[in-house]
Amino acid sequence: QVQLVESGGGLVQPGGSLRLSCVARGSIFTIYAMRWYRQAPGKERELVAAIKDVGMTTYADSVKGRFTISREIAKNTIYLQMNSLKPDDTAVYYCNANINSWSTSYWGGGTLVTVSS
């Protein structure tokens, strides 16, 4: 069994920064890709950033230049450094990963990020 656990959310003022973490725990042999999604109230869940096993990263246009996804392979952990936060970044941020198989996808429970003055 595999679990994804996010942390690091909270309340931040516009222009501020936060760093989210997601750790994968359990019977893990290979992590093929890990991603951050977000879902704002009344909106669909959207992909924010992704990192593949070879280290390739992708970002949504709305966060390019402000957010950075990174990983610590030995800790089965990814991070999302979020800078220059805007009120539109307010959402529940979810971690997603393909672990042990490309066809197996896991989700974390989410962490709330609120950007407000």
Image (spheres, rainbow, N blue to C red):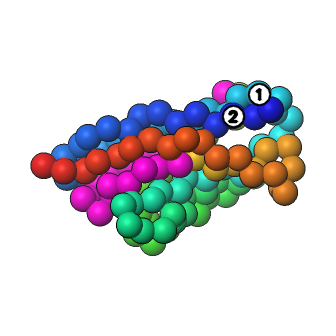
Identity of the amino acid at label 1? Gly
Q: Tell me if label 2 and label 1 are in contact, CB under 8 Å.
A: yes
Q: State the residue position of label 2.
A: 3
Q: Position of residue 72 (x, y in %)?
A: 63, 34
C-alpha span from label 2 to label 1: 6 Å
Task: Kindly indicate the quadrant of the structure image that contains residue 65.
Answer: bottom left
Q: Position of residue 31 (x, y in %)?
A: 77, 43
Q: Where 8 falls versus 93 (above or below)?
A: above
Kind of element beneath mark 1: strand
Label 2 neighbourhood size at 10 Å, few (<14), some (14-19), many (20+)? some
Identity of the amino acid at label 2? Gln
Q: Position of residue 21 (x, y in %)?
A: 51, 36
Q: State the residue position of label 1.
A: 26
In the image, what residue occupies the spot 41% across and 34% down?
8
Which quadrant is home to the N terminus?
Answer: top right
In the image, what residue occupies the spot 28% across and 54% down?
85
- Compared across the picture, whether 88 is left or right of 8 comes to left
- Compared across the picture, whether 31 is left or right of 15 comes to right
Kind of element beneath mark 2: strand
Q: Which disc number belongs to residue 34?
A: none
Whether residue 85 appears in magenta in the rendering, the answer is: yes
Label 1 neighbourhood size at 10 Å, few (<14), some (14-19), many (20+)? few
The magenta segment = 75-94
Q: Position of residue 76 (x, y in %)?
A: 68, 33
Whether residue 51 appears in magenta in the rendering, the answer is: no
Q: Where 66 falls versus 7 (above or below)?
A: below
Task: Kindly indicate the quadrant of the structure image that contains residue 52.
Answer: bottom right
